[in-house]
Image (spheres, rainbow, N blue to C red):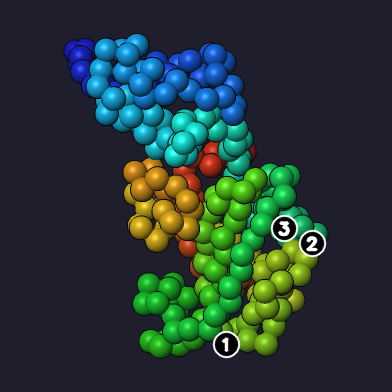
């Protein structure tokens, strides 16, 4: 295969140099990077070019830029999301939260529960009639004061009405433990994921740059009879997560 020479812009070159310095340990978590003026002088470029280099690093999730404080290396350690272990019955069946399979840092979860007409794509998956109600559980997860994920779980209202699933605090084991008590324990899961740029609402909710992609992850839970009992649509800040899938051959 013939080699292709890809020309890097000056801002990309500066960003690459700073990234390499961070990876070498020249700048540690919390350290302040050289400012726009210093970088402009060092590389012989305009201030706007140096500014774009720092923005590139912020988009990648390596630094945070605050007005008056410059760019600092982010100290946040990405969450390792263990996609298979986290939904195993030995996890929620033992009263543990799904989150505990991923990370042991405390998290703050803002929860809202609504009863609403199922969106058409959700109704199709849950095999609901047009206009049939679902219980929608919206959550915003924050770790170390950083929003990392937005999620909305949809469950048939006819299945969970009056149960702990409709409460803010669902109790030990969460939604899946409560579904088991209702006779619809999850027996099979399907996860689909893709990546795209966030909507304005998603970027605001995750407090992240609009130029940084999010991971869109949709998990469907099926009971023993093969009925879809939950659809969970998640939006993850890609810089806050490592997706970890480990399974036997």
Does label 2 or label 1 sit earlier along the sequence?
2
| CA–CA distance in space, label 3 to label 2 | 7 Å
> Are dots 3 and 1 in contact, CB under 8 Å?
no
In the figure, is residue 239 to the left or right of 29? left
Q: Is residue 107 visible?
A: yes
* Quarter of the image where one finds residue 109: bottom right
Horizontal relation, residue 194 to residue 115: left or right:
left
Residue for badge 3: 97
Q: Residue at x 42, y 35 (%)?
A: 58
| Mark 3 → mark 1, Cα distance in angstroms | 25 Å
Q: Nearer the viewer, mark 3 or mark 1?
A: 3
Q: Residues within 10 Å of mark 2 (few under 14, many from 20)?
A: some
Residue at the disc numbered 2: 95
Question: Which numbered tag is attached to residue 84?
Answer: none
Using the image as rendered, state which of residue 136 and residue 124 is in the foreground: 136
Helix, strand or loop under label 1? helix
Q: Secondary structure at mark 3?
A: loop
Residue at numbered disc 1 = 158
Above-or-below relation of 125 to 20: below
- The quarter of the image holding the N terminus is top left
| 206 to 19, vertically: above or below | below
Quarter in which the C terminus is drawn: top right
Residue 53 seen in render: no
Q: List x then y, in percent, for residue 54.
A: 38, 29
Foreground pick, 156 / 110: 110
């Amino acid at each position: 295969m013939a080699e292709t020479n890809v020309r890097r812009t000056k801002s990309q070159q500066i960003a690459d140099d700073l990234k390499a310095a961070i990876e070498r340990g020249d700048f540690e978590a919390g350290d302040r990077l050289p400012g726009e003026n210093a970088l402009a002088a060092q590389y012989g470029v305009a201030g706007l070019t140096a500014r774009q280099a720092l923005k590139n690093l912020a988009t990648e999730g390596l630094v945070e830029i605050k007005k008056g404080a410059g760019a600092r290396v982010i100290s946040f350690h990405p969450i390792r999301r263990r996609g298979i272990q986290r939904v195993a019955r030995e996890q929620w069946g033992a009263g543990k939260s799904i989150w505990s399979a991923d990370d042991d840092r405390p998290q703050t979860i803002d929860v809202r529960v609504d009863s609403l007409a199922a969106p058409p794509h959700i109704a199709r998956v849950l095999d609901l009639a047009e206009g049939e109600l679902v219980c929608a559980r919206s959550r915003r997860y924050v770790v170390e004061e950083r929003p990392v994920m937005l999620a909305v779980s949809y469950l048939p209202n006819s299945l969970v009405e009056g149960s702990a699933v409709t409460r803010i605090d669902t109790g030990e084991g969460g939604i899946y433990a409560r579904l088991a008590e209702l006779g619809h324990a999850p027996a099979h899961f399907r996860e689909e994921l893709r990546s795209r740029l966030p909507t304005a609402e998603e970027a605001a909710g995750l407090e992240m740059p609009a130029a940084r992609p999010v991971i869109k992850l949709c998990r469907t839970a099926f009971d023993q009879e093969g009925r879809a009992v939950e659809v969970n649509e998640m939006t993850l800040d890609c810089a806050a997560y490592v997706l970890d899938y480990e399974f036997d051959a």
